[in-house]
Image (cartoon, rainbow, N blue to C red):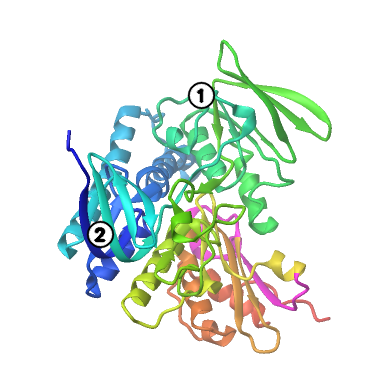
């Protein structure tokens, strides 16, 4: 046992080693800052790398191969029924995560970032205590709080051994029946993973529709396909009770005053995430989170305490790794006396369902709710050559523009590889592009990216591969 408390000083202390924290450390070190990074996990990378974005996409890729093999007969290709080797699949996911985590370690080491393992708690305006293998007091000039978020719980589950996304991503088993509580992006993505692996999946959503944050017309395409593989999709339904049974779980669901009981071997609770701002000693800094556990920050990612910055899931805005990464760079640059500010107008959102959903900027629903005049150009993938060659024609791309100037205000899409296509839309929003900019950009043929050009042509009133809009 190490007696006493170690002490050290640093110019910049960063609490949290996820996509916000470790990127801030790298950028600050590159700009000449002395950086100490604290994280309580054995491996760096945060939820996204260790038990979120990366392992889930590895599984989604695997299930996509299964689906492709099953659907290949429609184009004249027949395969023997696939055999799922769960240990090998787990190994693939773990090796993917481990390789990336090792890469993060190497990047930080090369920059000279001092990594301290343990749980950090602020003890004063310029000090924090790290409790790990031993206690260590760190004195700092400036700090970045990047502690991320954790899975939210639900009262009905109590202490029952339900799965969270963390357990589900470990694929401990493929249950015959799986109830997914929560029809957001995590619930639907993992629901499709387990349905692809062979489970009979029922999704229960409290809101009137699945993926309540996305435009309904985008979600409708995903729901239509998911209904072919799910045992059920229940909306406007509240879980009011849950108990253990000999076979697994019995879940009581209430819809329009009527109750029914669903049974399954496993239950996955995916009802959102909670910011990790409790038990950090933020009061010692003079900071207090809001009712949702978030810290208010300026466009420089600076809190009410000038030498303390906050980024990622613990500040307002969508809980997205790429948002945290951008905020990380802003904070590091401001700390290093560079002029920088975070602009939230062009944060892309992606749902990695099958088909994928993506959007950036103003949504059609937001335009309707705000009574904003917009011109919308919508192009169906069934009219796109590349989508036809892929045998995946469900979905569309829509572009929202200002009627007077043609300024691109928002883009939404649903279909194969939407996660890759949305980057062009995000660039258009960031640079203040107009319809004319999109119209004169030559897109390679045949590609899915042509759908963006085609949607722009519809918005401009000059479509080629769909009929022109009717004259009013």
- Residue 448 seen by the camera: no
Residue 85: name its quadrant: top left
* Residue 50 position within the rendered picture, expressed as x and y whole percent measured from the top left: 35, 44
Q: Is residue 377 magenta?
A: yes
Task: Identify residue for label 1.
Answer: 161
Nearest the eye: 326 or 227 = 326
3D distance between C-alphas at marks 1 and 2: 37 Å
Label 2 crowd bin: few (<14), some (14–19), many (20+), radius 10 Å: many
Q: Which residues are magenta?
A: 370-395
Task: Please identify the residue farthest to the top as the structure is shown.
Answer: 246
Where residue 201 is drawn, which disc sits there? none
How many numbered circles does the render carry? 2
Is 303 situated left or right of 16 in this image? right
Q: Is residue 271 rendered to the left or right of residue 132?
A: right
Q: Secondary structure at mark 1?
A: loop
Residue 394 lies in quadrant: bottom right
> On the rendered image, what quadrant is the C terminus found in?
bottom right
Front residue (pair 65, 331): 331
Residue 298 visible somewhere in the drawing: yes
Q: Residues within 10 Å of mark 1 (few under 14, many from 20)?
A: few
Residue 103 position within the rendered picture, expressed as x and y whole percent measured from the top left = 22, 54
Left or right relative to 397: residue 59: left
Instruction: Let me know if residue 143 is in the magenta part.
Output: no
Q: Residue at point 72% right, 71% down?
A: 367
Label 2, on which residue? 36
Who comes first in sequence, dot 1 or dot 2? 2
Query: Disc 1 or disc 2, which is closer to the eye?
Result: 2
């Amino acid at each position: 046992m190490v007696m006493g408390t170690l002490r050290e000083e640093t110019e910049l202390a960063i609490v949290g080693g996820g996509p916000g924290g470790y990127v801030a450390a790298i950028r600050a070190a590159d700009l000449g800052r002395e950086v100490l990074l604290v994280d309580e996990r054995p491996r760096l990378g945060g939820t996204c790398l260790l038990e979120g974005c990366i392992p889930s996409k590895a599984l989604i890729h695997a299930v996509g191969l299964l689906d492709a093999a099953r659907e290949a007969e429609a184009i004249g290709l027949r395969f023997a029924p696939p055999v799922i080797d769960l240990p090998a699949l787990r190994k693939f996911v773990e090796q993917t995560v481990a390789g990336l985590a090792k890469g993060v370690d190497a990047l930080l080491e090369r920059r000279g970032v001092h990594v301290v393992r343990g749980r950090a708690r602020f003890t004063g305006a310029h000090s924090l205590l790290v409790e790990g293998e031993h206690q260590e007091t760190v004195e700092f000039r400036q700090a970045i709080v990047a502690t991320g978020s954790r899975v939210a719980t639900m009262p009905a589950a109590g202490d029952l051994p339900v799965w969270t996304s963390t357990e589900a991503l470990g694929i401990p088993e493929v249950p015959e029946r799986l109830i997914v509580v929560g029809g957001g992006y995590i619930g639907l993505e993992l629901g499709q993973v387990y349905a692809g692996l062979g489970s009979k999946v029922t999704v229960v959503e409290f809101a009137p529709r699945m993926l309540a944050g996305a435009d309904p017309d985008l979600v409708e395409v995903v729901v239509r396909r998911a209904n072919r593989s799910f045992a059920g999709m229940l909306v406007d339904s509240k879980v009011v009770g849950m108990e253990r049974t000999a076979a697994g779980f019995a879940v009581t669901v209430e819809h329009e005053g009527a109750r029914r009981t669903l049974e399954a071997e496993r239950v996955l609770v995916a009802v959102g995430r909670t910011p990790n701002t409790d038990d950090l000693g933020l009061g010692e800094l003079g900071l207090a989170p809001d009712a949702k556990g978030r810290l208010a920050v300026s466009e420089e990612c600076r809190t009410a305490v000038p030498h303390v910055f906050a980024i990622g899931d613990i500040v307002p805005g969508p809980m997205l790794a790429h948002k945290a990464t951008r905020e990380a760079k802003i904070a590091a640059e401001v700390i290093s006396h560079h002029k920088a500010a975070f602009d939230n107008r062009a944060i892309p959102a992606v749902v990695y369902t099958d088909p994928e959903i993506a959007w950036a900027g103003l949504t059609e629903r937001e335009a309707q709710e705000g009574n904003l005049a917009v011109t919308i150009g919508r192009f169906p993938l069934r009219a796109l050559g590349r989508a036809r060659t892929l045998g995946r024609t469900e979905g569309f791309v829509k572009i929202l523009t200002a009627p007077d100037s043609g300024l691109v205000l928002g883009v939404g899409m649903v279909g194969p590889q939407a996660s890759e296509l949305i980057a062009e839309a995000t660039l258009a929003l960031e640079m203040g592009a107009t319809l004319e900019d999109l119209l004169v950009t030559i897109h390679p043929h045949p590609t899915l990216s042509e759908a963006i050009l085609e949607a722009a042509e519809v918005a401009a009133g000059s479509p080629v591969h769909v009929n022109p809009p009717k004259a009013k």
